[in-house]
Amino acid sequence: MKNNLFYSLLAVCLFSMFSCQQAPEAPVATAPVETPAPPDMAAIKAEIQALESAYAVAHTAGDAATVASFYSDDAVTMGDDMPAVTGRAEIQKEQEKFYAERKNKRTVSFEVLEVFGDENRVTEIGKSTGKDETGKVVYTGKYMAIWEKRNGKWLTIRDISNDDKKEE
């Protein structure tokens, strides 16, 4: 009788063990996930440099309206030795005041040293150089700007700058 009980229990265990196993799942076909191409930072840097060069022309000419057009309506700029200025209209007013009070004619240039970010927002690190009428460097400085692409156009949304030394 013990043998019959043993075989009965063995049969129940084996039946339970095999009947509870699930059939292996068929592999699910998935579409390959496309990873977007990284932004072409060299091309973006060239775009920002072109904007900085156009900004330099407007700044040298004392064209406050054009200078302000490089900023978003909600931009904040933090220049050397002055309080922060918020908004394109206020930036234009400050530029007009600066150009009216400017004592000497000089040219300015901006060199983009680095940009990082993505195709919609980048941070720029650059340096500025001011020269007098003879071409002598009278000041150098550095700056950081955050550019954002809005309606297909790069605009500065934040910037900060300061001089390495005061103008001679």
Image (tube, rainbow, N blue to C red):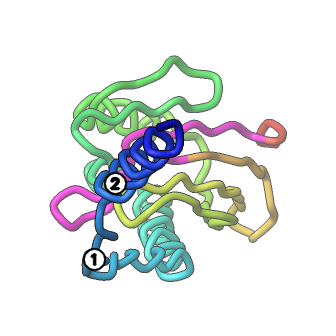
Q: Residue furthest top?
A: 83
Please state the horizontal and vertical placement of residue 58, each as a whole percent of the image.
Answer: 40, 61
Horizontally, residue 12 falls left or right of residue 158, namely: left
> Can I make out residue 143 in this image?
yes
Q: Amino acid at mark 2?
A: Phe
Does the magenta-highlighted stretch encompass residue 162? yes
Residue at disc 2, secondary structure: helix
Q: Which class describes the residues within 10 Å of circle 2: few (<14), some (14-19), or many (20+)?
A: few
> Can I make out residue 63 in this image?
no
Most foreground residue, 94 or 85: 85
Horizontally, residue 5 falls left or right of residue 42, namely: left
Please state the horizontal and vertical placement of residue 89, each as a whole percent of the image.
Answer: 22, 33
At 51% across and 40% down in the image, what residue appears? 159
Q: Quadrant of the C terminus?
A: top right
Q: Which class describes the residues within 10 Å of circle 1: few (<14), some (14-19), or many (20+)?
A: few
Does the magenta-highlighted stretch encompass residue 4? no
Please state the horizontal and vertical placement of residue 81, each as a whole percent of the image.
Answer: 64, 23
Q: Is residue 81 above or below residue 101?
A: above
At 52% across and 45% down in the image, what residue appears? 3
Residue at disc 1, secondary structure: loop
**Rounded to the nearest whole Å, what is the CA distance between mark 2 and mark 1?**
24 Å
Q: Which mark is residue 26?
A: 1
**Between discs 2 and 1, the one toward the N terminus:** 2
Main SS of the magenta part reads strand
- Quadrant of the rendered image containing residue 152: bottom left
At 26% across and 37% down in the image, what residue appears? 88
- Specify the segment rendered in magenta: 145-163
Please state the horizontal and vertical placement of residue 126, each as a whole percent of the image.
Answer: 66, 57
- Quadrant of the rendered image containing residue 124: bottom right
Most foreground residue, 25 or 30: 25
Which residue matches tag 2?
15
